Image (tube, rainbow, N blue to C red):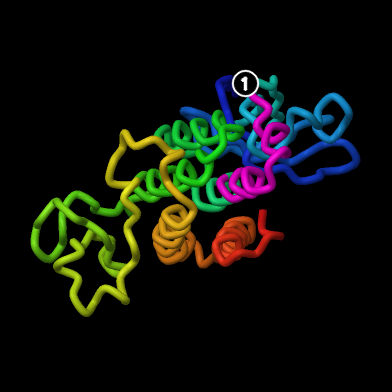
């Protein structure tokens, strides 16, 4: 039993002295576990970093076995993100969310494409945060928890959508929200325009987007598994909030 295709390294953990137990997200095979022999060694370490895009090959005698996985580096996203603490935090959060939410060995090509797009542009200023929000929206959709942002749940209008119901996941227009507005989740404008450039979304809009997707990830995707949001995801939201509040250390 074997397969070979592009993949994203989601998680690595020590296994013995020099091997790593890994989770990768493959384009058509989904989240997949494997043993990277020598992955912690001098030659393997640069490849087996969370967020890296690789050409992966998995081999096992029987399909139910853990199997061995090897990889060739395609895009060193982890090394690129090291230059920017916020980009590195986004990378870690995205990989942790994918590793924790996606069922094993189940294809989710849309999530793979969104995550690959995020990691491919991880070094471009201003793009990582909005790309993370878009990835999480796609992840929710593929897991069956997609939000309906097409029209207002109360009036049916498709204009001036500004909120999302935390209960139903449907959009609500600003004028229809009324006294309920403080109880609703904010809907950042960049999520309503698929063609909007990611670098046009400011930090406040990204924070609102993370609050929106985080609510449904915690309630549905991770709630179904009786698990909390990953620490890396919680830390990213806290870092962004502190940065918006003027904390110079949250960079």
* Nearer-the-camera pick, 47 or 199: 199
Pinpoint residue 8: horizontal percent, then vertical percent: 59, 32
Pinpoint residue 5: horizontal percent, then vertical percent: 55, 21
State the residue at coordinates (73%, 39%): 82
State the residue at coordinates (46%, 28%): 28
State the residue at coordinates (58%, 62%): 234
Pinpoint residue 58: horizontal percent, then vertical percent: 64, 26
* Nearer-the-camera pick, 90 or 111: 90
183 relative to 36, above or below: below
Pinpoint residue 56: horizontal percent, then vertical percent: 63, 24
28 relative to 91, above or below: above
- Asked if the stretch drawn in magenta spans residue 79, the answer is yes
Could you tell me which secondary element the residue under label 1 belongs to?
A: strand
Q: In terms of image quadrants, where is residue 69?
A: top right
- Magenta segment main secondary structure: helix
* Nearer-the-camera pick, 107 or 235: 235
Magenta-highlighted residues: 75-94
């Amino acid at each position: 039993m074997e397969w070979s295709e592009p993949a994203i390294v989601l998680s690595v953990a020590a296994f013995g002295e020099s091997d790593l137990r890994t989770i990768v997200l493959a384009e058509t095979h989904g989240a997949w576990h494997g043993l990277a022999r020598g992955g912690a060694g001098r030659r393997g370490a640069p490849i087996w970093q969370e967020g890296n895009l690789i050409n992966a090959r998995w081999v096992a005698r029987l399909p139910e076995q853990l199997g061995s996985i090897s990889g060739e580096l395609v895009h060193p996203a982890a090394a690129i993100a090291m230059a920017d603490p916020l980009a590195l935090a986004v990378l870690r959060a995205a990989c942790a969310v994918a590793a924790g939410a996606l069922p094993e060995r189940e294809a989710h090509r849309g999530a793979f494409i969104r995550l690959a797009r995020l990691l491919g542009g991880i070094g471009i200023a201003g793009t990582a945060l909005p790309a993370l929000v878009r990835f999480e929206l796609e992840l929710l959709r593929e897991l069956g928890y997609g939000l309906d942002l097409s029209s207002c749940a109360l009036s049916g209008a498709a204009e001036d959508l500004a909120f999302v119901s935390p209960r139903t996941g449907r959009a609500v227009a600003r004028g229809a929200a009324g006294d309920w507005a403080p109880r609703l989740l904010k809907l950042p404008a960049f999520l309503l325009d698929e063609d909007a450039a990611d670098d046009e979304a400011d930090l406040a809009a990204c924070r609102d987007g993370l609050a929106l997707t985080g609510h449904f990830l915690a309630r549905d995707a991770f709630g179904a598994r009786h698990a909390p949001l990953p620490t890396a995801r919680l830390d990213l939201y806290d870092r962004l909030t502190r940065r918006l509040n003027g904390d110079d250390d949250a960079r």
